[in-house]
Image: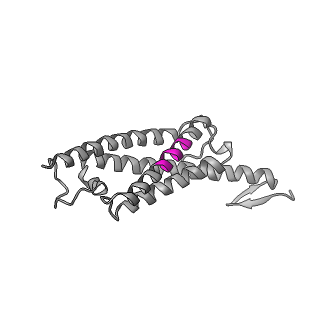
Amino acid sequence: PPHTRSRGGRAMAGSAGASVVGSAFDRKRRLDLLLLLHGSTAALSGSLAVIFPHLFGIFLGEGWHGSFFRWNPDDQQVKLTHVIIRLYGALIVGQAFIVLHVRGCADGGMRRGIVRAYFVVFSLTTLALLRSHLTDNAWHFYNWANIILFGFLAVFYGWFYWFSPPPVFDGGDKAVL
């Protein structure tokens, strides 16, 4: 047909309708990739936070104690910091299960709701970290890594929430990688 064109080795009929379907499918694959990367990274970092909280203590002003295997610090403030890091790590591990599970979910409304929730969470996290970094003396150069990480996650999830059409989130024809 005269309106047939090739896209990625596939013949597509019609220019407008096929372009939207192809684009939605590609965005669906990108969303699934984002969820896969986020879920996998969250599982790893959350597990590390639960098992080795001192690896993350540097972000909260804790000094280096010369060992990766320091289980029982003497300082009470450091012990409290480790408890908070472990609790946050447990939440991150739980989020990893949610994110990895939602990849296989056929409910577009729920997938879109999860994406919106992560956009809000990561936006607020970025703002809170940025405010703390700029107003508190305890923050270190390493915290820019967290600010940038959460900022990018907010942008990625926000892009999907604000600019993706409903077919990206819908149905059993998801492009799970």
Measured along the vertical axis of the image, is residue 156 above or below residue 170? Answer: below
- Please tell me which residue lies in front, 46 or 88: 88
Of all residues, the one furthest to the right in this rendering is 2
Residue at the spot x=40%, y=51% of the render? 41
Residue 49 placement (x, y as % from top left) = 30, 48
Which residue extends farthest left?
Answer: 74
Horizontally, residue 71 falls left or right of residue 6, namely: left
Residue found 82% across the figure and 53% down from its top:
14
Residue 6 occupies quadrant? bottom right
The residue under the point 56% across, 43% down is 116
66 displayed left or right of 165: left
Dividing the picture into quadrants, the one containing residue 150 is bottom left
Q: Nearer the viewer, residue 62 or 26?
A: 62
Quarter of the picture holding the N terminus: bottom right
Nearer the observer, 132 or 118: 132
Query: Which segment did they paint magenta?
Result: 115-124
Say whether residue 123 is magenta.
yes
Residue 21 coordinates in the image, percent (x, y) = 72, 49
Does 8 appear in magenta?
Answer: no
Left/right of residue 98 with respect to residue 25 in the rendered view:
left
- The image position of residue 63, as x and y in percent, is 22, 59
Q: Residue furthest front?
A: 135
Tag count: 0
Q: Residue at x 12, y 49 (%)?
A: 74
Q: Magenta: predominant secondary structure element? A: helix
User: On the image, which quarter does residue 65 sit in?
Assistant: bottom left
Q: Is residue 154 left or right of residue 166?
A: left
In this rendering, is residue 138 above or below 172?
A: below
Residue 50 screen position, x and y as percent: 28, 44
Q: In the depicted view, which residue is nearer to us: 176 or 40?
A: 40
Way the structure is coloured: one colour
